[in-house]
């Protein structure tokens, strides 16, 4: 199931027209299971944290990169911006 979540995250982000656009964790969960998406939110969070640790994803809080080891509350996901460099580092 983690592979499904990871695929959904990257497919949704690839579908965004403008670079730097983000998705919500709910978007990813609904892409995997439209009816039972709520039970996947914990898994989306875990996959997002792992991808952020690898530098493949940025977790945003208040539209700023968050530390994947220490964030709470509402968050969004986006691809790292190569041009931003250090901005993507928490």
Image (cartoon, rainbow, N blue to C red):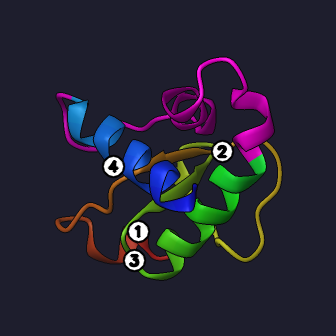
Which sits earlier in the primary sequence, circle 3 or circle 2?
3
Q: Which mark is residue 65?
A: none
Return the x and y of residue 56 as percentages of the image width and height. 36, 70
Residue 56 inside the magenta-drawn segment: no
Q: Secondary structure at mark 1?
A: helix
Instruction: Check whether the beta carbons of the residues at disc 3 and disc 2 lie within 8 A of each other.
Output: no
Q: Which mark is residue 10?
A: 4
> According to the image, label 1 marks what residue?
88
Return the x and y of residue 41 as percentages of the image width and height. 73, 42
Which sits earlier in the primary sequence, circle 1 or circle 3?
3
> According to the image, label 3 marks what residue?
55
Image depth: mark 1 or mark 4 in front: 4
Residue 40 inside the magenta-drawn segment: yes
Within-10-Å neighbours for mark 2: few <14, some 14–19, many 20+: some
Image depth: mark 4 or mark 3 in front: 4
Which sits earlier in the primary sequence, circle 4 or circle 3?
4
Return the x and y of residue 25 as percentages of the image width and height. 60, 39
Q: Residue furthest top?
A: 35
Q: CA distance from mark 3 to mark 2?
A: 17 Å
Image depth: mark 4 or mark 2 in front: 4
Q: CA distance from mark 1 to mark 3?
A: 9 Å
> According to the image, label 2 marks what residue?
75
The magenta segment: 17-41
Instruction: Check whether the beta carbons of the residues at disc 1 and disc 3 lie within 8 A of each other.
Output: yes
């Amino acid at each position: 199931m983690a592979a499904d979540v990871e695929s959904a995250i990257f497919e949704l982000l690839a579908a965004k027209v403008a670079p730097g656009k983000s998705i919500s964790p709910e978007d990813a969960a609904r892409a995997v299971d439209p009816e039972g998406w709520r039970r996947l939110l914990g898994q989306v969070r875990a996959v997002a944290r792992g991808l952020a640790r690898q530098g493949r994803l940025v977790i945003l809080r208040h539209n700023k990169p968050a530390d994947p080891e220490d964030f709470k509350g509402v968050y969004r996901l986006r691809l790292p911006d190569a041009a931003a460099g250090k901005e993507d580092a928490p």
